[in-house]
Image (cartoon, rainbow, N blue to C red):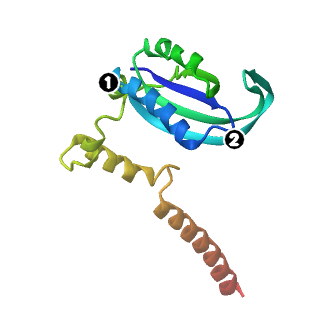
Amino acid sequence: MPLYDCMLLVKPLVRKEEIKDLLARVGRRIFQRNGVITDLKSFGTVPLAYGIKKLDGRHFQGQLMQMTMMVPPSFPQELHYLNKEDRLLRWLVVKHRDAVYGLEYMNDRDDHDELSLFNSSSPLSTKHAIQDEDDDDEDGVDDEDDDDDDDVEYEYEDEGDEGDSENK
């Protein structure tokens, strides 16, 4: 089922109980169609860019609500009864186009074997252990060789100093 956002702009003077009743009515329709409400947000009273004219006057503020839901694709067409709702200034349904959910989400995941990484007898865990050991020598130069090169330089300097002291 696709994921949708239903934005409801309610008149500013509508009481909270009436908003809850309106949301409950939409929620019952969602559940009747085997849908699920995944999130419900209230943005409080928001100023509007222009006045919205209704029978009881022009409104310059509104209470904004967002209901996120997973419903069948035919469900947004069933919400047209909200046009007759006198408590609403505007309503809008927006579909999440890039959302991956349900069985598609489970099938598209590349890391579905992530628990096998913790199994010590798994070939993946052995492979990771070998890679970790190799990561220490990324620059290709062993630390022991660096120490040997330094020792050789000091030996040459020491030999030269000893030769000078013997000649004196």
Q: Is residue 144 left or right of residue 59?
A: left
Which image quadrant for residue 38? Answer: top left
Tag 2 residue: 45
Q: Amino acid at mark 2?
A: Thr
For the point 61% across and 76% down, the residue is 159
The correct choice, above or below, for 17 with respect to 97 in the image is below
For the point 60% across and 41% down, the residue is 15
Separation of marks 1 and 2 at Cα, in angstroms: 38 Å
For the point 45% across and 55% down, the residue is 136
Q: Position of residue 20 (x, y in %)?
A: 50, 38
For the point 42% across and 32% down, the residue is 37
The correct choice, above or below, for 38 with respect to 92 in the image is below
Q: Position of residue 153 (x, y in %)?
A: 60, 68
Q: Nearer the viewer, residue 164 or 32?
A: 32
Q: Nearer the viewer, residue 112 or 134?
A: 112
Q: Is residue 58 left or right of residue 99?
A: right
Which image quadrant for residue 59? Answer: top right
Query: Mark 1 or mark 2: which comes first in sequence?
Result: 2
Mark 1 packing: few (<14 Cα in 10 Å), some, or many (20+)? few
Q: Residue furthest right?
A: 50
Residue 103: image tag: 1
Mark 2 packing: few (<14 Cα in 10 Å), some, or many (20+)? some
**What kind of element bears circle 2?**
strand
Q: Amino acid at mark 1?
A: Leu
Q: Residue furthest front?
A: 56
**What kind of element bears circle 1?**
helix
Q: Quadrant of the C terminus?
A: bottom right
